[in-house]
Amino acid sequence: MPDPILVVAGSERHDLTGRRFVFANAAARELLRITAEEGMLLSAIRDPEVLGAVDRALFDLADAEVVYETTGAQSRSLRVRARPLAPAADGARLALLTFHDETEVRRVERTRVDFLANASHELRTPLASLSGFIETLRGHAKDDPAAREKFLGIMQAQADRMARLIADLTSLSRIELDEHVPPRGVVDLAPLVGEVVEAATPLGAQRGVKLDWRPCAACSVSVRGERDQIVQVVQNLLDNAIKYSPDGASVRIEMQSGLTDTAAAGVSTDIIPRLSLVAPDPSSETYAVLRFTDLGPGIARQNLPRLSERFYRVDGQKSAARSGTGLGLAIVKHIMNRHRGGLVVASAEGEGSTFSAYFPVAGAPEAVVKAS
Ligand SMILES: Nc1ncnc2c1ncn2[C@@H]1O[C@H](COP(=O)(O)OP(=O)(O)OP(=O)(O)O)[C@@H](O)[C@H]1O
Ligand SMILES: [Mg+2]
């Protein structure tokens, strides 16, 4: 059985330590971190609600159902069902305990609720503006070609914004859905970054922003990942660096490999305020990092923790030239989580910003040696 199952025995209602599990399948042993198939129940489960359900099945001979939340890094929610069984040969009362993992179902449900709430909120503004202009075009602007042209231009921009918003939201919810599925592919970082930088060069040129791409010396660094998603990370961080750069400044994109997680999280600049937005999986030993440094307005220390929230944008940066939906970094955060990598921002007001995204290097040790 893939679901954890436990058979519990007990004789006395008041003898808590007398409750024993007399059978635990492999899934139950893994879930409750027990090694034996038999033992004291309290050594396996201490949750009062679950123990209460066991008692109802053992002594009231009634079915019981509770939700059990495990703690720790990988917290799960499990629906626990307790059913009375026929007594054992020695007269002990028996109950069957089944655990059904509902973590995914709950997470998906929460994602869906958040998604709908945020999406409708964000779509309302451009939609209201569209309706307003339609009304104006039907009314007093009807016979004014100049006004009509202007309003149609604004309407087009609002419609484009809605389309982008929907594309970003869909992308975000898709990424969230498979956040717990480790990426399968192996991606060579340097050519990928090179391509994205090249594609963004015209965008930078429009604002006189130069892109200074510095691949590392030995640039065959493969990381475990999904190519399209890593492209999204690079695109979003580069897009922000360009967008928030002053006209004519340059954006530096650096790559390094063979680093420990602490070294990957560190930054080469002197900017002190620094915050980890995504912590890497500690089981990995070697990381490759991509750093995006701009000379833009920077971000005040108190705003750093909110950066990867959906729809969050720093006040005072919401000008037309810096349009956006505030979803870019939320997307980056979920992708980095899925890749078991890290994301660190180092920034101070007036000092520019450095965003570092680092990935566990894929299994080939020679790639690590070459790059270090
Ligand atoms: N390099 C940066 N310099 C200064 N502020 C930044 C930088 N990157 C992000 N921010 C701040 O963080 C906010 C969130 O960034 P995010 O990329 O999520 O959204 P956005 O760029 O506004 O919109 P989108 O990426 O969805 O087009 C931005 O609105 C901006 O206020
Ligand atoms: Mg952005």
Image: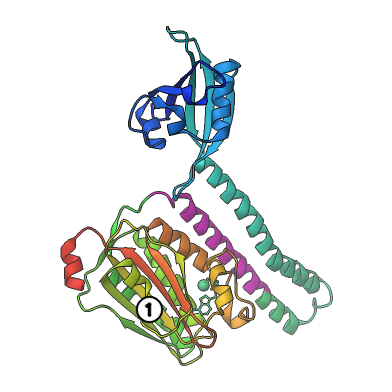
168, above or below 198, in the image: above
- Taking the spot 74% from the left edge, 66% from the top edge, the residue there is 128
Dividing the image into four quarters, tell me where ligand 1 lies. Answer: bottom right
8, above or below 174, in the image: above
Mark 1, ligand 1, within 8 Å: the answer is: no
Is residue 168 part of the magenta span, yes or no? yes
Question: In the visual, does 362 lie left or right of 75?
Answer: left
- Measured from the top left, where is residue 89 in percent x and y? 42, 6
**Image quarter (top left, top right, bottom left or bottom right) of the N terminus:** top left
Q: Residue furthest right?
A: 140
Q: Residue furthest bottom?
A: 248
- Measured from the top left, where is residue 288 in percent x and y? 30, 69
* Front residue (pair 363, 137): 363
- Taking the spot 58% from the left edge, 75% from the top edge, the residue there is 302
Is residue 130 part of the magenta span, yes or no? no
- Taking the spot 31% from the left edge, 76% from the top edge, the residue there is 255
Task: Decide: few, some or many residues near mark 1? Use Cα within 10 Å; few <14, some 14-19, many ≥20.
Answer: some
Question: In the visual, does 295 lie left or right of 137?
Answer: left
Q: Which region is colored magenta? A: 155-181
For the question of whether residue 177 can be seen, the reply is yes
Q: Amino acid at mark 1?
A: Val
Q: Which residue is mark 1?
A: 267
- Measured from the top left, where is residue 183 in percent x and y? 35, 54
* Front residue (pair 44, 177): 44
- Measured from the top left, where is residue 294 in percent x and y? 45, 84
For the question of whether residue 19 can be seen, the reply is no
